[in-house]
Image (spheres, grey):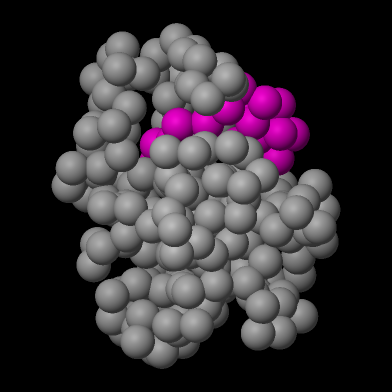
Amino acid sequence: MAHVQIINSSNSHLFEDLLEQTYRLRHQVFVEERGWRDLARPDGREIDQFDDEAATYLIAVDGDRVVGGQRLYPSTRPHMMSEVFSHLVQRDLPVGPDIVEVTRYFVAKERRFGRTDCMMLAAVMEYCLDEGISAMTAVVEMWWLPRWQQAGFVTRPLGLPVEIEGQDCLAVEILVREETLARVSRLAGLKGSVLRRTGLATDEAALRLSSRQS
């Protein structure tokens, strides 16, 4: 059964193959499929300056194969919205220890618009609740908004749409809510958590999870 593995600097040595698959699948999705040529690399690995020790990855795995993923990054450090897409933000950019940026969301082509997509949305909401995160920021194509609305995501625009790579894109803030996790979990047909914390020190997160469930 597919699950979502949390990977950060403390356990990345255990999951070098999953990270390598992730970078190559990102190249396939963003460069080869979507035509984001500025991200192209001759080694076929899509990787940038934010794939560093501060990044956390939520990687969907089926068997030993990566089928989806997303990257979370602290808003308290220079991040993609503050450094690359600041022109999309026309109000105060949400930053703080309880706010993360979500980037590089992808699902393998044959898994889109199905259970894997909803599972990934549930995973990021569950992770943020477990970690005490109150909001996420993201730059997304406009077609994401009705999908998020269906999944129960509560969003706030941070500016007006701007065309990027032929798509109207928007900077948004996404509120982290228990109700959203419950709704998207139902859509995904999930009976419990899909997150795996193999190799992580999870004492604080486990305490928060226990308090949420009590």
* Magenta stretch holds residue 68: no
184 left or right, relative to 167: right
Q: Position of residue 150 (x, y in %)?
A: 74, 34
| Residue 129 in view in this figure | no
Q: Position of residue 45 (x, y in %)?
A: 46, 62
| Residue 11 in view in this figure | yes
Q: Position of residue 22 (x, y in %)?
A: 52, 66
Q: Nearer the viewer, residue 59 or 125?
A: 59
Determine the image quadrant of residue 135: top left
Residue at 63 percent across and 72 percent down: it is 66
Asked if 105 appears above or below 206 in the picture, the reply is above
Residue at 31 percent across and 39 percent down: it is 80
Q: Position of residue 127 (x, y in %)?
A: 47, 62
Q: Nearer the viewer, residue 40 or 102?
A: 40
Q: Nearer the viewer, residue 78 or 202?
A: 78
Q: Which residues are magenta?
A: 135-153
Asked if 121 appears above or below 8 in the picture, the reply is above
171 left or right, relative to 90: right
Residue at 45 percent across and 64 percent down: it is 43
Q: Nearer the viewer, residue 214 or 172?
A: 172
Determine the image quadrant of residue 145: top right
* Magenta stretch holds residue 144: yes
Q: How many marks?
A: 0
Spot the residue most to the front: 42
Asked if 194 appears above or below 71 in the picture, the reply is below
